[in-house]
Amino acid sequence: MQRTTIIRKKMATLFILLLLTAVVGRPAGAATVTNGRDLLILYSNNVHGELEPCG
Amino acid sequence: MGGLSKKAYQLEKIRRETTLPVLTVDGGRLLFKSPLLAPAEAEEAKATALGIAEAYAIMGYDAVGIGANDLAAGPEFLAETVRRTGLVWLSANLTRRSTGAPLFPGYIVRQAGKLAVGIIGLTAADAASLPADQDVVIKPWREVLLPIVEKLSKECDLLILLTDNTQTENQLIAKEMPAVHLLIQAFPSGANLAPLQAGNTLLCQTAPQGKYLGWLQVDWQQSKSWGDNDTARRLEEKKQELDGVEARLGRFRERLAVERLNADPGYRELLAYRQKLNTEIQELAKNLNRQQTAGSAPATFKNSFIAMETSLPDEPRVRAVVEKTKQAISKIGNRQTVAPLPGPADAFIGWQACVGCHSTQASFWEKTRHATAYRTLETKSQQHNQACLPCHVTAGPGPENPSRPAASLLNLSSTLQVVGCEVCHGPSRAHVADPAAAPLPTRTVASDICQHCHTPDHDDNFDYAVDRGRIACPAGQPAGKSSR
C-alpha cells in the first residue's frame, strides 16, 4: 500500500515537471529557433499555365 | 516541357527521397491566361481552371497566392474551387468593397520540422482583373501587409510571401518589410531567376507555364538573416582539400613499398599538410558551432530548377484529372454554337487550292511538321482546347487579324485544320481566283509571322534565322508559267 502511494507521488511529480517544462520552456508567442534547421521549399510558377502542352 | 502530371511525379519523388521537411507553394496566376474572359471562351476556361485547381490540391500544395488572373471568372468561382478541391488560396488584400472584409484567408502558419513558417498571399492590384459590378476590391499592399507581418513575426521563425506583383514592386515590398524572408513571385517573365537578395528578402521565381520546379534548400538560423557564411564555406573548402590530400597519399602508398614511404620527402610533406588541414578543420567546425549556438550565423540556401521534361513519367491521379478535364473541354467544344469567322475569314481557301500551281512547294510542305500540326492535337485529344487551336490551324489569329476569337476556330473545314500555306503567306482566296490581279499577300515570311506562335513560352528553342531555313519552301515557278 505504502509502495503504491510512493509510486503515485513520483508519477505526480514527474507529471508536474513535464507540465512545467512545456509551459516555462516554451513561453506562448515566442519563436522557437534553435540552430541549423534545414527546410526544403518547392515553388512553381504556372503563369500562362496549362494542363499539359498542346501537342 | 511542362504538364501537371509530370510536376506531380517530380514532387512526389522529391518528397519521397528527402529527409527534410518540405513546403510546396505557388505565387499565383495559375488558372487563367488573361484577367478577363471572352464569353465564348469562359466555359472552357473554367473547366480548365477547375482541373488545374484539382491537380494542385492532389499535389499537396501548402498554399497558393491569388494572382490577378485567378479572378477572371470572379471570386465566387475561386471560392468554388476551394469547396470542390480544398486548395488553400491566400490573399491579404482581396476584400469586399462594401465591408473591407477579406474574401479569402490572408495567411496561414505551417509547422515544417522545428520551424513555424508564416505564409502570406498578396494579389497584384490589377484593376482590369475585377468585374466592375462585383463587391470586390484589391487593396494596395501598403494598407494591409504591415500588421500581418508584425503579427506573424512574433509567432513564426520564417515568413514567406506569395505574390504576382512585378519584380520592381516586390523589391519595394522587400525594402519596406524586411521581416519577409522569402518572396515567391509569379510573373510572366521568360526565364528562371537565380534567387535575388533584396535587403533581407530572397526573391525567387521560376520560368512560367509550369515548365520548371524551383528547389530551395534553406539552412535557417536564429539570426533570421541571409548571408554568405564564410566559416561554413571555408570549412567545406578545407574538407574538399583534405579529400584531395588523402587521394594523393593513397597513390603514394600504391607506388612505394612501406619502408621507402616514410623516407620519401614528398610523402612526409603531404602527411604534415594533412595534419595542418585537420587542425584547421577542427578549428573552423568549432567556430561554426560557436556562431550557431550564439545565434549569429547567417542563414544560407541552395537553389536549383528542375525541368519538367516530357520524358518524365506521369503521376496517375493527376493524369486522371488531366484526362477528365480534357474530356470535359471536348464536350463543351462539341456542343458550342460556333460563330462564323469574323472579318476576312472567307479570305482563306485552304492548302489544296495552292497545289495546282505550286506542286513543288506543296510536296515540300507536306513533309514538314506544319502539315501535321492539327493531327498532333487530335492525338492528344486537344482539338477542342481553345488555348491550343489558334496555332494548329489555318485562319488562327495572325497579323491580319490578331484578335480573332479562338472559339471561332472550333469547327473549321478540314482543309483549314492544318498549318497550311496561308498561315505564312496570308489569306489567298483572291490570289487563287486571279493570280495576276492579286499577288500572294506575303511572299517572304517575316519573323513576326512565325513568332505569333513560336513564342518563348511555346517554343523556347525557336531561332528565326535557323528555323526559317528549315521550313522555307523550295524556289520554283508556278505551273504554267515560263521561267524566261
Image (spheres, rainbow, N blue to C red):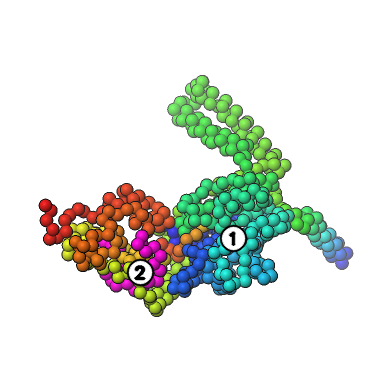
Q: Nearer the viewer, residue B60 or B133?
A: B133
**Residue B100 x, y percent position in the rendering:** 68, 67
Earlier-in-chain disc, 1 versus 2: 1
Considering the image in quadrants, where does the N terminus of chain B appear? Answer: bottom left
Residue B347 can be seen in this image: yes
* Element type where label 2 sits in the image: loop
User: Seen from this angle, which residue lies furthest front?
Assistant: B437
**Residue B346 x, y percent position in the rendering:** 30, 70
**Residue that numbered label 2 is attached to:** B343
B144 falls in the magenta region: no
Say which chain tag 1 marks.
B
The image quadrant that residue B295 belongs to is top right
**Residue that numbered label 1 is attached to:** B125
Q: Residue at x 67, y 71 (%)?
A: B98
Q: Residue at x 47, y 51 (%)?
A: B191
How many angstroms separate mark 1 from mark 2 (CA)?
A: 35 Å
Q: Nearer the viewer, mark 1 or mark 2?
A: 2
* Element type where label 1 sits in the image: loop
Q: Kindly identify the amino acid type of the residue bearing the numbered disc 1.
A: Ala
